[in-house]
Amino acid sequence: MPKTLSEMVKTPIKIKAKKNTEINNIPYKPTFYLSSQELPAIKDWQVGKEYELLIKVKQIALRENLDEKGGKKFNADFEIQSIALSK
């Protein structure tokens, strides 16, 4: 069984993902950081091009806040457990 992210991404997998329409309607997109040590394929990728990844995460925190209208909103932190190329 692979122990590192690098070992996990050597064999691409195909997935069928349900398109998340909610994220398309927000003014900003969440971001995350990966190095080529964690995902070697990124060294050959191009800025601005889209890539599909399958990421397994573990939720490590949840915070409840108020939005600008006084309503509840939640923020969560995640730790990446594994990552794989989907194509």
Image: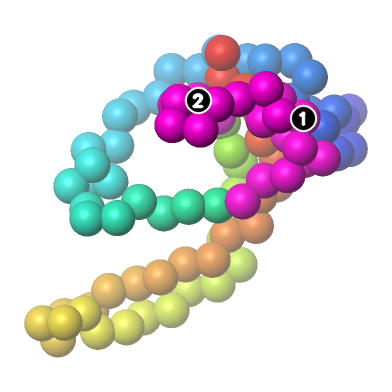
- Quadrant where the C terminus sits is top right
As displayed, is residue 18 above or below residue 23?
Answer: above
Q: Within 10 angstroms of label 2, few (less than 14), some, or many (20 or more) residues?
A: few
Magenta stretch, main secondary structure, is loop
- Quadrant assignment, res 14: top right
The disc label shown at residue 61, or none: none
Left or right of 2? Residue 78 is: left
Q: Position of residue 34 (x, y in %)?
A: 67, 46
Q: Within 10 angstroms of label 1, few (less than 14), some, or many (20 or more) residues?
A: some
In the rendered image, which residue does mark 2 sit on? Answer: 51
Q: CA distance from mark 2 to mark 1?
A: 14 Å
Residue 45 visible in this rendered orientation of the protein: yes
Q: Determine whether label 2 and label 1 are within 8 Å by CB.
A: no
Q: Position of residue 85 (x, y in %)?
A: 62, 23
As displayed, is residue 10 above or below residue 28?
Answer: above
Q: Earlier in the sequence, mark 2 or mark 1?
A: 1
In the rendered image, which residue does mark 1 sit on? Answer: 40
Query: Residue, x 10% and y 82% (percent of image)?
Result: 69
Magenta range: 33-53
As displayed, is residue 56 above or below residue 62?
Answer: above
